[in-house]
Image (cartoon, grey):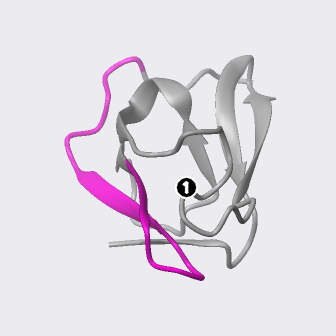
Amino acid sequence: MARPNKKAPSRTVEIFCAQCKTRLFKYRKGGKGALLKCFKERIVEDDTHTPCHCPNCEQCFARDTLIRGVPAFKIIGGKATMK
């Protein structure tokens, strides 16, 4: 499998908790599809205190995993939104 592009995309989106609307992080997203995974190297600003948990409501919104050999967060469906 191919690794993600080394050149980060220029478009930044903000990721919010779906339950309490707290901002989780700012992320450089490529493409126009849904948010399924977030590569850690593309996170610009991280507002979470513990990885994969919302700092406000403590809901788990993702799983820490390796995707194509690169550390990433796999987003759980319906737990996070982007704008």
Q: Is residue 36 above or below residue 20?
A: above
Q: Which quarter of the figure has residue 39? A: top right
Instruction: Report which quarter residue 6 is drawn in.
Output: top left
Which residue is at the front of the view, 11 or 2?
11
* Quarter in which the N terminus is drawn: top right
Q: Residue at x 75, y 59 (%)?
A: 60
Residue in the picture at 56% in, 44% down: 38
The question of residue 43 being in magenta is answered with: no
Which residue is under mark 1?
55
Task: Say few, some or many: other residues with alpha carbon within 10 Å of mark 1 (under 14 / 14 to 19 / 20 or more).
Answer: some
Farthest left residue? 10
Residue 81 position (above or below residue 45)? below
Read off the magenta span: 6-25
> SS at mark 1?
loop
Q: Give coordinates of residue 50: x percent, y percent.
A: 64, 39
Indicate the position of residue 58 as horizontal and vertical percent values. Answer: 68, 61
Q: Does 72 sit above or below residue 37?
A: above
For this view, does 72 lie left or right of residue 23? right
How many numbered marks appear?
Answer: 1
Front residue of this view, candidates 73 and 29: 73
Q: Residue at x 75, y 64 (%)?
A: 76
**Which kind of residue does numbered mark 1 sit on?**
Pro
Rendered location of residue 22, percent (x, y): 43, 69
62 over 58 or under it: above or below: above
Residue 20 belongs to the span the image colors magenta: yes
Q: Horizontally, is 68 left or right of 2 in the view? A: right
Report the residue at 68% width, 79% height from top: 78
Horizontal and vertical percent position of residue 73:
67, 41
Report the quarter where the C terminus lies.
Answer: bottom left
